[in-house]
Amino acid sequence: MFKINDNYLKLPGSYLFSTIGKKVNAYAAAHPDKKIIRLGIGDVTQPLAPAIITALHGAVDEMSRAETFKGYAPDLGYEFLRNAVCENDYKARGCNISPDEIFISDGAKCDSGNIQEIFSVDNKIAVCDPVYPVYVDTNVMAGRTGTYDSVRETWSDVIYMPCVAENNFAPQIPAGEGKTPDLIYLCFPNNPTGSTITKSQLQEWVDYANRVGAVIIYDAAYEAYISEEDVPHSIYECEGARTCAIELHSFSKNAGFTGVRLGFTVIPRDLKCGDVSLHSLWARRHGTKYNGAPYIVQKAGEAVYSPEGKEQLKKQVAYYMNNAKYILEGLKNAGYAVSGGVNAPYIWLKAPDKMTSWEFFDYLLEKANVVGTPGSGFGPSGETYFRLTAFGSYENTVEAVERIKAL
Ligand SMILES: *Cc1c(COP(=O)(O)O)cnc(C)c1O
């Protein structure tokens, strides 16, 4: 009789978005006259920019002719895209990364979930709390996280780094016996808190990782939303990152590719365990388990870096960040403790009057017909916090903020 991977059975149900959906549907059914505004979505809403549409059409036409038809893509991705990424995301920022250290993929969620499989099951992971759930759950599936405490909602073998108002939502370097991680997941600008850290703070993490022999898995999905000067766009802006850091990128949030699917992972050749380079392991994995992002989509990705594409996407990001500013300032004026929203499309707020995250969710839904995401769904330190996103339309964003202010 076959046996299953029973690590999957250890996963607690992911009730967050299904519970939100059920509550919203029940409310809508009972109050059909109310207009509900959803500011809980983590998905973009603006259509693809014209430069990207043109590139997609052109690539589709190429596929229709024998002379320009493309089959399987090269293992690491097309050179035209790896070169564009290298020039724009790395060389232009003074980062020493070469095109053959860039692995094109179909998105950062898959890569952030798959990357753990090139590491030993004995490695200990450290994550921010609250956190993007993919990092933890994929390590649970691999059997790396120990046992689950359903009261505290934490795993015995995971190091949690609380990110709360008291530390300005920046994780502290783990200290104490049994608290030295092997793999450190960092995501800045952060989902869900919208916070960032400065280049010198990130440098401390790089120095720490090199000192203790840890690898930092750096998720830069929201890099395009950075507006402040001293916030790093890439971990490779830090000295020594080539020997300790893997970086994940996505085209989802900067270019609206959530339904198109494109991303990349950077593994420098200097990142080694003894004689073994992680680059060669990931290349082996890529070659064995993956057959590449579509040519059509990689051409669309190339257009992200064209002069027209850059101009159009700057406007798209500015549209969302204008929403973020409206939410941030509106709620601040209404007396809420709010953060994020400056270098990220997420606003993180403290529920008022000692409400829990879910109590505030119900309150907002019933009194303002506005939907957000309870912070406790992202980890125990998210309790009493609440996430609003800037991915809605401007009109809905304004109306939602006005309703909250009127409460
Ligand atoms: C949206 C998001 C991603 C991007 O995922 P894709 O698979 O590229 O769409 C990655 N990391 C975080 C933290 C995100 O919020």
Image: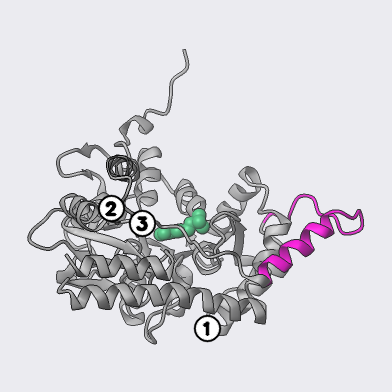
Q: Is 143 left or right of 237, judged from the image as shown?
A: left
Which mark, by number, is residue 38? Answer: 3
For the C terminus, the quadrant is: bottom left
Q: Is residue 273 above or below residue 50?
A: above
**Residue 61 belongs to the span the image colors magenta:** yes
Q: Residues within 10 Å of mark 1 (few under 14, many from 20)?
A: some
Which amino acid lies under the numbered mark 1 shown in the image of this protein? Answer: Arg
| x then y, percent, for residue 246 | 47, 63
Q: Is 294 left or right of 355, judged from the image as shown?
A: right
Total marks drawn? Answer: 3
Closer to the camera, 401 or 320? 401
Residue behind mark 2: 378
| First-in-chain label (3 vs 1) | 3
Residue behind mark 1: 93
Q: Gap in Å between the C-alphas at discs 2 and 1?
A: 32 Å
Q: Nearer the viewer, mark 2 or mark 1?
A: 2
Which amino acid lies under the numbered mark 3 shown in the image of this protein? Answer: Arg
| First-in-chain label (2 vs 1) | 1
Q: Report which quarter residue 149 is drawn in.
A: top left
Q: Gap in Å between the C-alphas at discs 3 and 1?
A: 36 Å
Magenta span = 51-75
Q: Secondary structure at mark 2?
A: helix
